[in-house]
Amino acid sequence: MQKANYDNLYLLNNEITKYSSNNNNWELEKASEIIHKSLDLISKEKNQTSTLITFIDNSIKSKLKI
């Protein structure tokens, strides 16, 4: 799943490069949509990382109490 998120992000980056090189307004709107999708993927990744860190912290704390 993690790799899939990064693959999607790279695909979106390639799309935005393609669309932003064209001055057509429709293409710029498409690029804007892709930026938002990229930001969503980054946000999900950040949340997953935060959840993992919390889990690790709690696991370490519980093992130290034993």
Image (tube, rainbow, N blue to C red):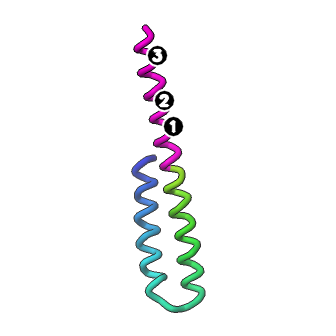
Q: Residue furthest top?
A: 66
Residues at marks 1 and 2, CA–CA distance in whole angstroms: 6 Å
Classify residue 9 by image quadrant.
bottom left
Cβ–Cβ under 8 Å for marks 1 and 2 = yes
- Residue assigned mark 3: 62
Position of residue 63 relative to residue 39, above or below, is above
Identity, as a three-letter code, of the amino acid under mark 3? Ser
Position of residue 16 relative to residue 61, above or below, is below
- Residue assigned mark 1: 51
Q: Residues within 10 Å of mark 2 (few under 14, many from 20)?
A: few
**Residue interval drawn in magenta:** 45-66
- In this rendering, the count of numbered labels is 3
Identity, as a three-letter code, of the amino acid under mark 1? Thr
Position of residue 66 relative to residue 12, above or below, is above
- Residue assigned mark 2: 55
Image coordinates for residue 49, horizontal then vertical, percent: 46, 42
**Secondary structure predominantly adopted by residues drawn in magenta:** helix
Image coordinates for residue 66, horizontal then vertical, percent: 43, 8
Identify the secondary structure beneath mark 3: helix
Identity, as a three-letter code, of the amino acid under mark 2? Phe
Cβ–Cβ under 8 Å for marks 3 and 1 = no
Q: Residues within 10 Å of mark 3 (few under 14, many from 20)?
A: few
